[in-house]
Image: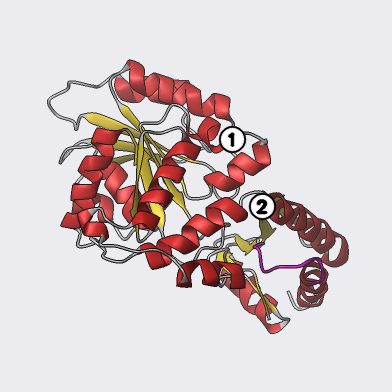
Amino acid sequence: MIDLRSDTITRPTPAMRTAMAEAEVGDDVWGEDPTVRALEEETAGLLGMESALYVPSGHMANQLGLYVSTRSGEEVWAHEHHHLIGDEQGATAVLARALPRLYSDGTFPTDALLESWIAGRGDVHRAEPALVWLENTFTGRVVPLAEQRRVTGFAHRHGLRAHLDGARLWNASAALGVSPAEVANGFDTVSVCFSKGLGAPVGSALAGDADTVSRARRGRKLLGAGMRQVGIIAAGALYALRHHRERMVEDHERAAELARLVTDLSGLDARARTNMVLVEAPGCQGARYAEVFARHGVAGLGMGDAVRLVVHLEITDDDVEKAARGLAKAAAEL
């Protein structure tokens, strides 16, 4: 089986396992784990931020980003398909108790939408807006930096904060050929993931200014995520950050080749977005298509009207060719 469900399924490489086994550790709740400190400092530096906080998951990094930028009952503006909305079990309402205001078109809000939403500010009948939310990449699509800066500029002109869900920011950086700091530029907080694309076994981070991250650290403790000798797993993230970012363009190239081969060999409509390939499944048959794909040796994720295939560091050129041939056989059953 060629497993393309996600880039989170990778296993630590031998070199990463060595780094983890040999990691210098201390009690991180007391701020004494040197490997965690090194990871946080390096992450903050790469993102052009003052500080960063290591957390167990991207879900927590996002929720802490929300927690430090909103008060109970305030609005966060986001897309209806952002991870914050569809994949975090309603935590927005449960933990930060913020009110999502959602748009559905495109990958970022238009000027007209932003202006219409800010127009009602101060009305006693409605929640006060506090935070604008973006993702990059967004389901594999790279959001242009000019569009990010347009949105963050609007937010700051109106006294709102801006958060970037950068779980796959590293892919956006590689695809654009710019530094991670350029992708993060203009945001008050940024979340990044060390397992998606980079191949670390555990962890994400929230970055921002020192005061914001200090408050996020208290929020992490509030959620029960104070960790002790966590440098053992932080070492895997640090190794990935130092050794796996440069190779991410290989995943993008293999995804593009997979999309081309699938289209040519099977006639299925496949398109590549960074390290992802989306295969169309008309009529919201994504789950059925994924079942058929699996019978022919390719594991993908059914998502409504598409099947998502994600290329990662364990996928080779040979795997790409085998997957394409498997999908060509699957197409005959559809």
Task: Give the quadrant of the C terminus.
Answer: bottom right
Of the pair 132 and 80, the residue shown nearer to us: 132
Residue 318: image x %, image y %?
82, 71
Residue 48: image x %, image y %?
46, 32
> Can see residue 319?
yes
| Residue 69 left/right relative to 292 | left
> Can see residue 99?
no
Instruction: Tell me what residue is drawn at x 34 percent, y 16 percent.
Output: 157
* Highlighted magenta segment, given as a residue range: 311-318
Residues under labels 1 and 2: Cα distance?
13 Å
Which residue is disc 1 drawn over? Answer: 179
| Residue 107 left/right relative to 273 | left
* Image quarter of residue 44: top left
The answer to whether marks 1 and 2 mark residues whose Cβ atoms lie closer than 8 Å is no
- Name the amino acid type tagged 1: Ser
Does 190 appear in magenta? Answer: no
- Name the amino acid type tagged 2: Met
Which residue is disc 2 drawn over? Answer: 248
